Image (spheres, rainbow, N blue to C red):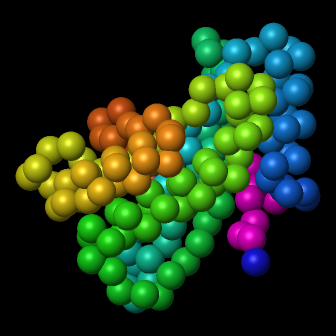
Amino acid sequence: MEQQWRKLNGKPIGQPIEDEIRERIVQEKAAGHELKVCIGTDSQVKGNTTEFATVIVFIRKGKGGFMYIRSETSRRKMSVKERMLVEVSKSIDAAFHLCRIFTLYNIDLEVHADINTNPAFKSNEALKEGMGYIMGMGFAFQAKPFAFASSSCANKVVQ
């Protein structure tokens, strides 16, 4: 069962995300906006559960942006490395399902990983695998400090 996507204001999307995205791109292009898309996931461990938030962030070059959010919860205990790779997997899943639409409308797509490039941080253990997974799927990759979709946008949802 596909998890429910919603807008930033919390309003659920009443149709498949692919249809919503396609319609919104047509509207944005008609308004003359140049778009870029960044997809990322962040997670927060809260007691026995881990909350994940995946975001699809649209940047209107020079004119703000908007995003869609999907939240999920897991009761499985995970190491930091495994949790980082699950985040990457959730982002790739969203990117894979939508990449045809972005290609059709000539929109640049980046997948952002909430993985630190500094070896002093535990998340760094997943950097090589996460980067390889994203790039191996053919997507542009960003990690901290440039991965704002996961580090800032998705982070705000799971706090």
The structure residue drawn at horizontal position 73% and vertical position 40%, both measured from the top left corner, is 100
Q: Nearer the viewer, residue 28 or 127?
A: 127
> Is residue 4 inside the magenta stretch?
yes
Quarter of the picture containing the N terminus is: bottom right
Observer able to see residue 157 = no
Q: Is residue 46 above or below residue 3?
A: below
Q: Nearer the viewer, residue 81 or 47?
A: 81
Q: Is residue 100 above or below residue 103?
A: below
Q: Main secondary structure of the magenta part?
A: loop
128 with respect to 110 (left or right): left
> Is residue 98 inside the magenta stretch?
no
Q: Which residues are magenta?
A: 2-12
The structure residue drawn at horizontal position 38% and vertical position 64%, both measured from the top left corner, is 85
Q: Nearer the viewer, residue 65 or 124?
A: 124
Looking at this rendering, what residue extends furthest in the left direction?
120
Residue 3: x %, y % from top left:
71, 70
Q: How many marks?
A: 0
Observer able to see residue 102 = yes
Residue 83: x %, y % from top left:
36, 70
Residue 65: x %, y % from top left:
66, 28
